[in-house]
Amino acid sequence: MAAKVEEHKFPCNTCGSDLRYSPGTAVMECGHCGSTQQITNRGGWRGQSIREMDFRKAVKDQLPAFEMEELHTISCENCGAHVEFEPNTHAAECPFCATPVVTDTGMDRQIKPKALLPFALSEKEARSKMTDWLGRLWFAPNGLQDYARKGRKMQGIYVPYWTYDAQTATDYTGQRGTVYYVTKRVTVTVNGKRQTQMRQVPKVRWSPARGHVSRFFDDVLVLGSNSLPKQYTDALAPWDLSEMEPYRPEYLAGFRAESYTVGLDEGYTEARAYMNRMIVRDVKFDIGGDRQRINSLDTDVGILTFKHILLPVWLAAYKYRGKTYRFVVNGRTGKVQGARPYSVWKISFAVTLALLAAAAIGYMVATGNTSY
């Protein structure tokens, strides 16, 4: 059985209004009266040990009940996002694609998050980063730039990720290639005439190789959601995972959290593909020589653990002239990614200018008038 739904409310001690986490600080702040409340027991990895969880037990559904929770989420049929909302919410707009969503009070059974990176940038700072980024896109429609500047506030979303730790040991067989050169007579064409020349030609001498490599993978990061294009979220990296804090609901006060839709085992498939690439690189280095061939790899994965973590993203989804444009901002570094909209008018104008400039240069060259 999963743990029951926990509702976390943080009323202001002064006026009773809801407190909201203040990005970049260690406090929650009341938007009504300005009072603050300290978040205690902070310190991140350096201050506390965050317990890894056993992957093999988790995929067999053998985790203790206290490691599980049931969440009330709404599901967007357009982009597939599952976002946590208050239990009495029955209609909302998807923060990922701006699609109206009407839903039942659905429940998701999930593994609890172990840690998170708190927001470091405020909504105002994130919006400034986004509008500056849009301003550098010369071909973006002016209407969209103005709409983004004057539009609604950005949404602060904690996006789900998996991290995987694995101890690997690999036995391999292969071949080591040593390059050597032989002198050969070759026929070449020089100035239209065929000539015979002596050339040094590379050859490879192959010899059998076998060996053993091992590597410990620490915090291989995999996105736990399909609601945003992966190229956007990948481009938000790197994340300063060494600054993560143990999960506390206070950091979510005033923000939303997306529940994962990429399962633990599905995420591991992606993580394992990354591990395999690193193992192949290690094996080639171990074989040595000038060239390498790998005939077989036999990898044993010993210790295999994971964490469910949350990373902060400021998100804007705008509908402009029937199209949805999405922009994401790393809530720690301010790095921006998103759709690159193009204005047909601006592109046409630029092409016209380029053609006129080319024609003018061609005319001056043809008439011999190249002075300025």
Image (cartoon, rainbow, N blue to C red):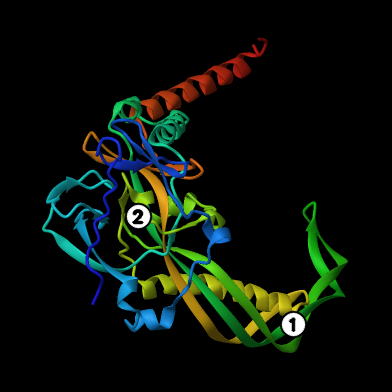
Q: Is residue 161 left or right of residue 50?
A: left
Q: Is residue 78 left or right of residue 242?
A: left
Rendering coords of residue 39 (x, y %): 43, 48
Q: Secondary structure at mark 2?
A: helix
Residue displayed at 30% across by 76% down: 65
Q: Is residue 156 visible?
A: yes
Quarter the C terminus occupies: top right
Residue displayed at 73% across by 80% down: 287
Residue displayed at 67% across by 79% down: 283
Q: Is residue 326 visible?
A: no
Rendering coords of residue 320 (x, y %): 25, 34
Marks 2 and 1, how far apart at CA = 55 Å
Residue marked by disc 2: 249
Residue displayed at 34% across by 84% down: 60
Q: Is residue 32 left or right of residue 93?
A: right
Amino acid of disc 2: Pro
Q: Quadrant of residue 23?
A: top left
Residue marked by disc 1: 176
Question: Quick one: label 1, few (<14), some, or many (20+) residues within 10 Å?
Answer: many
Q: Which mark is residue 14?
A: none
Nearest the viewer among 239 and 212 is 239
